[in-house]
Image (cartoon, grey):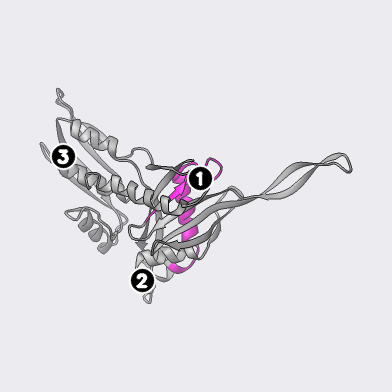
Amino acid sequence: MEKWLHVLRIRCEDVVQSDLFAEDRRADEVISDAFRAHPAAEVGGGSEWHIAATESFAEDAIAFQIGRVQSVTTPQYDDQRQRFYEAEGERAPYAHGVFDPRIQVCVIEKKSSVTAKAPEVASKLQKLLNNPSFAQKAGFRIVVDELRDPEGFIEQIHNADRVTRFQFVAEFENPHDVYKLIHEPAEQYNEVIRGDKTTVETRGNDLSKDVVEEMARSAASVGDPASATVVDKGHSKGRTIYLRGTPLLEKLNLPDGLDGLKVRMLDALRSAYKRLRHPTDD
């Protein structure tokens, strides 16, 4: 059985006008509690979305279901009275997911009936997780971003003759492994100054491609945008490339049935994040 998994970043953003008496809690605890609360919310389209069947495993990871409940009318046949009729019922497609609070990354299986597109899944999950009061009480807002594959951007960086400009956007601080040389301080600065986002730009005749790659991976790991100006071999003028890419997907192969699904999904989650953030590590 083959599955494809959306890879999403879940993080907490400090609310500027938060309560003076906000609870002092870690972001990963707040997010985990929001999952365990089994929130429900109307997110458009006439359906009520739910997080359900949460289960802790592997110390602090959380397995869950996400899906929608929708009223439907279906044609039926009454054999006794020999006539067709319309019957009201419910339709409830769902998908499996796993959240790893250690790196605040989540995977959700891709299903055409309920979780086909990563941006839509991220938006719905964000609304669900903010529905309980855990984040608000701690002075946070939970934000969910689809992670994007940076390999095409990085390949263009290394294939270029020179990189003459690199720019990235820093938003709120994340207690993970963002690039500590510049990404982490930029996030801290953005938080202290109470900004929505801070743009950092570097220009030069020949920027270090290795540092640009490290920063691009750091930005991709938290869903922040970035761009660069590159000069191709044999050209004098530069061109601008953007860290957009396609949503990051991880392939998962399973035997028939759901045995071991949550453990395999957690392994796939960590593998996808490692490939994104630290591809050369053993």
The residue depicted at 39 percent of the width and 73 percent of the height is 19
Q: Which of 115/269 is in front?
A: 269
Name the amino acid type tagged 2. Answer: Arg
Give neighbour class at mark 3: few <14, some 14-19, many 20+ (Cα, 10 Å).
some
Is label 1 in contact with label 3 (beta carbons under 8 Å)? no
**What residue type is disc 3 on?**
Lys
Mark 2 Cα-neighbour bin, 10 Å: few <14, some 14–19, many ≥20: some
Mark 1 lies on a secondary structure that is loop
Asked whether 62 or 27 is in front, the reply is 62
Label number found at residue 281: none
* Residue bearing the label numbered 3: 209
- Which residue in the rendered view is the most extreme toward the top? 234
Residue occupying the far left of the picture: 205
Where does label 2 land, which residue? Answer: 25
Q: What span is colored magenta in the figure?
A: 105-134
Residue type for callout 1: Thr
Residue at which label 1 appears: 115
Q: Position of residue 212 (x, y in %)?
A: 19, 43
Q: Taking 157 as reference, is 131 left or right? A: right
Looking at the picture, how far across and down is residue 230, in whole percent? 19, 33
